[in-house]
Image (cartoon, helix red, strand yellow):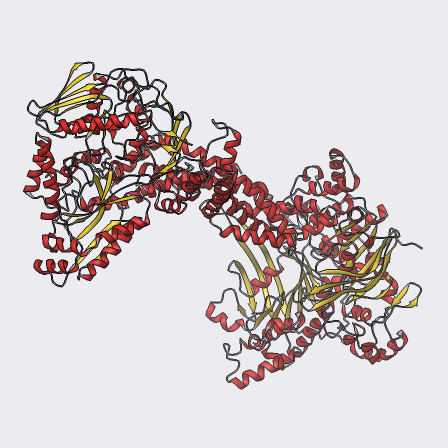
Amino acid sequence: MGRYICKRLLQAILVIFLISVFSYFLMYLVPGDPVYAVLGSDITREQYMEQFYLMELDKPIIIRYVHWLTRFLTGDFGTSYRYSVPVSELLAQRLPITMYLGIISLVISVILGVLCGTICGTNRGKAADNILTVLANLGSVVPGFWLAVVGMYIFSMNLGWLPSYGFAFPWEGAGVAASLKQTIMPVVCLSVGSIAGLTRQMRSGMLEVIRQDYIRTARSKGLKESTVVVHHAMKNAIIPVVTIIGLSLRNIVSGAVTIETVFSITGMGSLLVNSILARDLPVIQACILIIAGMVAISNLVVDICYGYLDPRIRIQ
Amino acid sequence: MEHFWEINKLSVSYKTMDGMTKAVDQVSLYVDRGETIGIVGESGSGKSQTQLAALQLIPVPPGRIDEGEVLLSGRNLLSFSRKSREMREVRGGQIGMIFQEPMTSLNPVKTIGAQIMESITLHRGLAKEQARKEAVALLEKVGILDAESRLSDYPHQFSGGMRQRIMIAIALAGDPEMIIADEPTTALDVTTQAQILELLHQLSVEKHIALVLITHNLGIVARYASRIYVMYAGNVVETGTAEEIFHQPVHPYTKGLLKAVPRLDSEDERLTPIDGVPPSPANRQKGCQFAPRCRYATEACLDGGIPPMQEIAPGHFAACHLSSVRQTAATAEQEKQENKKPKPAPGEEAVLRAEDLCVSFAVRKGLLMRESGRLEVLRNVNFTLHKGETLGLVGESGCGKTTTAKAVLKLLNEATGKVWLGDQDLLAMPERTFKKQRRRIQMIFQDPYSSLDPRMTAGGIVGEPLFPYGLVKTRQEYDKRVDELFRLVGLEPSMRDRVAHEFSGGQRQRIGIARALATNPDILICDEPISALDVSIQAQIINLLEDLQEELGLSYLFVAHDLSVVKHISHRVAVMYLGTIVEITSSRDLYLDPLHPYTRALMQAVPIPDPSAEKQREQVILGGEVPSILRRPEGCPFSNRCSHATDLCRKEQPQPKEVKEKHFVACHLY
Amino acid sequence: MKGFKKLLALAAAAAMITGTLGATNVWADEVPVSEAADESVKRGGDLKLGIGHDLVDLGVPSVGLTFQGSLIADTAIEHLCRYNQDGTLEPWLISGYEEDPDALTLTVHLREGIKFHDGSDFNADAVIFNWELWTENGNIELAGVTEYEKVDDYTIVVHLGEWNNAIATSCLYTAGAMISKEYYEANGQDAANANPCGTGPFVFSEWKKDQYVKFTANENYWIEGLPYLDSVEFDFINDPATQISAFLSGEIDAVLECSADTCLTLKSNGFESETKPLISGGASTILWYSCQDEGPMGNVDVRRAIASAIDMDAIWEYCSSQTGAIYDRTIQWGPNDVWSCNPETKGYPYSEEAAKEYLEKAGYPDGFDMVLYHISNSSQDEAICVLVQDYLAKVGINASIEAVDQTRLNTISGIDGEAFTGMTLSAGRAEVDLTTYYNRTFMPDGVRWVNQVDHFDDIVDTLTEGMTCKEFEEKEAACQKLSKMVIDDYCELLPMWTSSSAMYTHGNLKDHGIYQINYIIWTPEIAHFEE
């Protein structure tokens, strides 16, 4: 297993490196003058040329890439064109927020999704299954930002229970209650899609597993149905669900730009999108690499989980 | 007298697209403490459904228990709900169950220790440490070595036989008073089968556990069961002691079964098949379910409703309208004429000869996939097939019999050696020349359900080789030949335009045979052609093959693992073990005088459907596991399991010797 | 309150009277607002404003703040002068100034007794430091200064190399936002940029990037009794739905820089924008011709034809109705009703016949093809272009519309743009003093829209005259002449309107001064809540 992990780690590093190359080259092929992107359009010729040389735009792209890579590896992510602050500072401000919301959303999604899916799978055709399946289908098509706006309309404008915007950690000034109120709507909007997808996947996995011979054996042992479902069926049914969870792990760092915009949350999603629109190259590259790194890690984590969950893979 | 386990008039039906279909129809049976009973039947007989329904293990939305009671020591289990505590205490606690598929009956993600201890803690309430000790003891009892360390292993790390032992351990874990074994050995090899059954028998005797053996194999019930229930299409048709059932069968179905099943100890008696096919629960008859297939059926049988069980002798019941006297008289004549037709002797000419046939695969390891070794599947296989002869090729899984069949057909690139077809070496022949010879050897496959193209008509499948080989010139000749082939195998030519899935299993196998015969071959290789068919149908196909051999002068290479069938149909039999032929002799001698220790063990492992014969037989069960070619011993491949093994055996591979006339053995003992 | 306004009016009157003198002399009375602390005014309250724009720089005005940034910074940082409604300067942190064109000097007299938030004194050193910083950060407005002479702690004489009559505006308004020299020198530009340390009524408290900026009341503000409010907070809310929700539910007291959707929704909920037409800082929406084209666009009659073919009033009405911002229809490039605006400019009233006549005269009776560029992602710009296309089609001009992004537009219209046949729709500044921004376009070394205008000598001359004349009247005349030339004589561009952003309150916030006169200055010191 150890060797397997090492091999996958090396692969992951290779992938991330390739992505850094692609993203760097791609950004420079995109139209839009990077000098204007930094300084704005209201500048003199001298200012333009000064910035031009400062950004090494006169050198070939490979040299620029190598310089960039060297700096990157030493922790210097460059300075944002838009904000004129080090990119690491921006990331340090926004990444925790996105990760906080992302992890909460992930945990809720997994718990609810697996639970609902199990209920559906074990009560096939009955009321519980039908209702939950309809809800799951709805949940997978409803856009998160629509839900956000509707929620805001109901809970903020009309009822006044929850704030329309803003975000603060529980340990910051306003207190735990205020932070919680601010967190509820964004987390719900982020989670709905995942819950729906996980429910459906778990349901179909459950339906397949519950027909298997070993479930019949478990029942013939006289076990309670709940024990059969939880201890025997779920462990098998959850294996394909792990793949799906793995796919959505990257949302922890990539955030969701639409929901962040609606709730005025300063997260990674809006950072990435706004940086792309403003051609803020250092930020774009840093974000891409962080997301790529996360994807690589989540793939690795999923593989390890498989090995843990399914002994047939672990032990040859 | 109160029986331990009693089922009274149990009826179970299922809701299907065609409405409610009855799977079990008013079945009554009982088991006493410590007793071993056998429930015999084919597919659709309801033998498994009865027991599953009794324990309320059937899925209830489509299934439904219509009526009946199930008494366990007098308590009616059906009065408890499916998920109630009482039922759960019974399941696994007082009654343990073993199922047919050991490969899929264990939870793949839990250790076997966890699965055994689950039962122990549930039913015996022991603490974790205690439960663990118990689990180890159970594993040792069922014959798993290194039980302590193997507790933390997962099911996929065990072979099929060992998994079934683990299932037995689980069934025993709750300290049951009865074990229901539903086809426990069907998926296992012959020697493993014997081991498992023997184990069950010992446990039953030792712990005074009642044993319900559900199976279609008459030999098993003959060997182990004291009383037998014969079921057909959801009804019990006959019950009695083993002696009564086998020696004095009353119900026509029982009689038919006994005549249709080949026995190890029978002389060359032709099998009498039962016509027709077993019914599916969706098409139930109005009267006696067996009437359409019964040779003694009368009007009353067809219309008169399900016949009630009549007592023929104390404890011997049969559900038949006709008295046995009338039956016997009517058919004694018929039977005399049908049987006792001896098999024609084979000719002298050798049509196929395998000389030093070897097949080995490269084992590749590492990044560059270098060959790190070779895996020898077949080692120096030699045999001769004469004209009009059937050579049987038997062995357990991994022995290489299917590989031999493929090699002979030039389907394996890795095959070396020589295969003489007449005077030409097939393996050395270039492809162009072989094309013409190919039509002389044809193959019949095992699975009639997947070996026919689902999109082609039956006529199309059968007639496919006619034009390419130039066997017919015109369309009329083609049609005539296809019709002829259909009739040859006993199918109506009018069924030519039907598609494969519209035929039953037996009919499909006939189509497969017709296709093989289309090219006028000399040799047919039959790769387990009947193992996927019901018992009553198997006899039909066996007879068909025998007739065709006589009529067309065909030679068969018959590959199978069912020894009784092979012995019946073959003139000579070759026994294979780990890629080599350990013994070749006539089928008669194989049973009467087996020389190789493995052959002896095989013979002893196969039960004969005759209780008195069984009682007289020597019962020596071969220990150890069916080996894999990855771990082939040095010297004689059987040396690690043979009770007579010497140092020479372990060091040097024995060569085949003609010990008696036409009886070759590869063993150092001779 | 009344007292203050009266004083203001007096000061303005005084300025106008004295404005005709050769040496411009502006004085203000003593600290004008000692009575401003009106007892009847309700004190206290926390003001929360929602603003729809992000903030990048805050505390060092020299680096070039956005309009929104300047507004926010104005809470804590004050200017030496503010603007009056008619476009003249009102002394704020200074007590008065004198211009002497012949001596090439500007003398500035600072108010005494003002302290920065870090406790350091507001004095000549601080002011000079700010002016020097302005130039250091690449701004050109004070480039002509040869020396800042500190006469004493509260008097400075600015020496010029050549006379530039915009020097007062530049020193006292444009570069007149004052931050603490000591704080800057102790902490560096980056820290100062993130911590505005000025003299304003509120002290900077916290800035969470893209979330909010907080200020608390300055206990030691130089006007006694002020400010009335306890704290001011700007929350950044970009999404229209959120702006609406936050405003209507009362989470914020006012919303600025809101999107068109927000404006329309709030309008339909009965709220009126409190913005007045701005005299400085508004954006001028303009259709630029590609005057350097060798084809039709290079012909002034063609351009006149286009100007006549478009019913700009109709477009203005339509766009006004679609947005909550204030659109002030202009026919000149600059704000209306100020001294630089020429009342005699005729412009080109809508007339299809006139357009066709001009076209014939120019030699294109059957029209021609052209391309119309606008910024993508702006539905209003798209709508305008479609309407323009329609009008042009009626006179036979076939305009194809192309949406491009801002950087591309800058390239097309800027230094490196190539000649083309078409127009671009974009926005520029609109200031009182035309010379401060016309030079960036019409002077030979300009940078904005230089590819699209013709650099005529007489425009350059008039512009130069306007920048160097010594009398205010001369300047006024030059500006008005410039304005007329650009529109009537050379038809260099087609102005549409000047716009400013909408601003809504619940009606209980008074005297805030947001978007009343100009874009970047408001009156936080007297803002207060009313029942």
The percent position of residue C429, horizontal first and vertical second, equals 21, 39
Image quarter (top left, top right, bottom left or bottom right) of the C terminus of chain B? bottom right
Asked if residue B120 can be seen in this view, the reply is: yes
x, y percent for residue B484:
61, 82
Q: Is residue C162 left or right of residue C263?
A: left
Res. B314 image quadrant: bottom right
Q: Nearer the viewer, residue C131 or B180?
A: C131
Decide which of C293, C519 is in the foreground and name it: C519
* Quarter of the rendering containing residue B521: bottom right
Q: Is residue B401 above or below residue B293?
A: above
- Using the rendered image of the protein, determine whether residue A250 is visible from the camera's viewpoint: no
**Quarter of the image that includes the N terminus of chain B:** bottom right
Percent position (x, y) of residue B15? 71, 64
Percent position of residue C275, x then y: 31, 39
Residue farthest toward the top in the current orientation of the protein: C152
For the residue pair C427 and B642, the one nearer the viewer reads as: C427
* Left or right side of A293 for A82: left
How many numbered circles are shown? Answer: 0
Q: Is residue B465 left or right of residue B55?
A: left
